[in-house]
Amino acid sequence: MANESNPFPVKGYQGPELFCDRKEETADLVRNMTNGVNTTLTSLRRMGKTGLLFHVMETLKRKKGVQAIYIDTYSLSNLKEFTNAFASAVLKAFPENKPVGKKMMEWLKSLRPIISFDPISGNPEVTMDFVQQESYEHTLSGLFSLLEKQASKVVVMIDEFQQVSTFPEKNIEARLRTLIQPLQKTNFIFSGSDQHLLSEMFNNTKRPFFASTQLMHLKPIRKEIYAGFITEKFAGSKRKINSAAIDFILDFTRLHTFYTQTLCNRIHSSGIRDIRKDTAESLAYKLLGEQEVVYFQYRNLLTTLQWNLLKAIASEDAVYQPTSKDFIKTYNLESASQVQKTLQALLSKEMIYRDYDEKGSFYCVYDCFLSRWLSYQ
């Protein structure tokens, strides 16, 4: 039992066998990349966006003449860090033991960087320390030129791209757009989970990246597809899970990939061979109990009105008219204007999110497990 592999990973991309569906999205991204269409990919946090990017990379590997590069900008704070991270990603994609990588390494060494290697992964890490901002732009321009000269098409995936809008350098979006726009053989996927910021960057006519990409929003995996995946993976471990248990899992987690994977991972790790709804419920509530300390801390960080509104939204699961008289009366909230102000505060803290469906716009608690815990209080 201890050595049995869990087929529901909760972090990292573990290969196509443990990756659920996303066939349509993968095909669309691969088609865009092979046809020269830059793409902006948005989703809620933990919906499986980064996993999809790595799955697309895996798919592109099988195509001759395509090389993918991945960079995560979430922790980066300026152009210097972005340039160093990009150079490191390029060297990882084109290792020095290959002709292309050798040329890139020679060019980079001419800039006199510090090149070290991660002791765990063995991947190169490049650090350049220029005085002038223009030197970093020149380095990026040089890297793009080298990529353009390759026989293969190059796909650059920049995760959490909205982070560049917070860089302190002036006109950073315009400067990056100027470097990227002329490229013919290098295509980009700009992805991120701050949907408001990304939408502003690519849909606002006054922003440099306006109308420069095709937009794609990652939605939850369809229920029947996820149900089939869960059944198959439990069966592969010689487990049985009935349909009532699967329905509970997918409803409880709102089909939100991270939370679905987390609950399935916990159920699988329990060792139970015949899984029914009561089993899934018991383990789900245990998961919530383990997080109570964190959830109580949230209460201390929020105002009374913020906490009460958060609980009200959780109780409804999705709220379409938060300023309506009925909603305010039902949950003893204050005036509509106070609720509106509190909604903005909760949105800015990423405690809730706003989304749209066929019925209109609605608000949900961002952390699915927190939402379930709040609704049971």
Image (tube, helix red, strand yellow):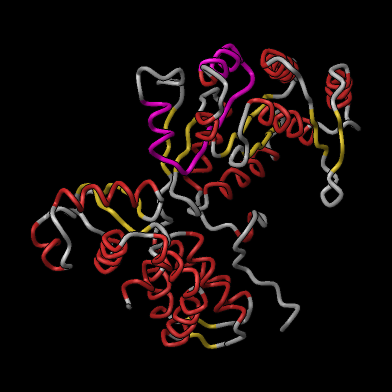
Above or below 180: residue 125 = below
Q: Position of residue 89 (x, y in %)?
A: 73, 34
Asked if the magenta segment contains residue 314, the reply would be no
Residue drawn at 48 percent across, 65 percent down:
259
Q: Quarter holding the N terminus?
A: bottom right
Horizontal side of residue 175 vs 93, given as left or right: left
- The quarter of the displayed image where residue 351 is located: bottom left
Residue drawn at 35 percent across, 48 percent down:
347
Q: Position of residue 221 (x, y in %)?
A: 43, 56
Q: Position of residue 252 (x, y in %)?
A: 38, 71
Horizontal side of residue 120 vs 363, given as left or right: right
Which residues are the magenta region? 174-203
Above or below 41: residue 352 = below
Q: Position of residue 216 (x, y in %)?
A: 43, 37
Residue drawn at 62 percent across, 59 percent down:
11
Between residue 278 and residue 78, name the one nearer to us: 78
Asked if the magenta segment contains residue 187, the reply would be yes
Q: Quarter holding the C terminus?
A: bottom left
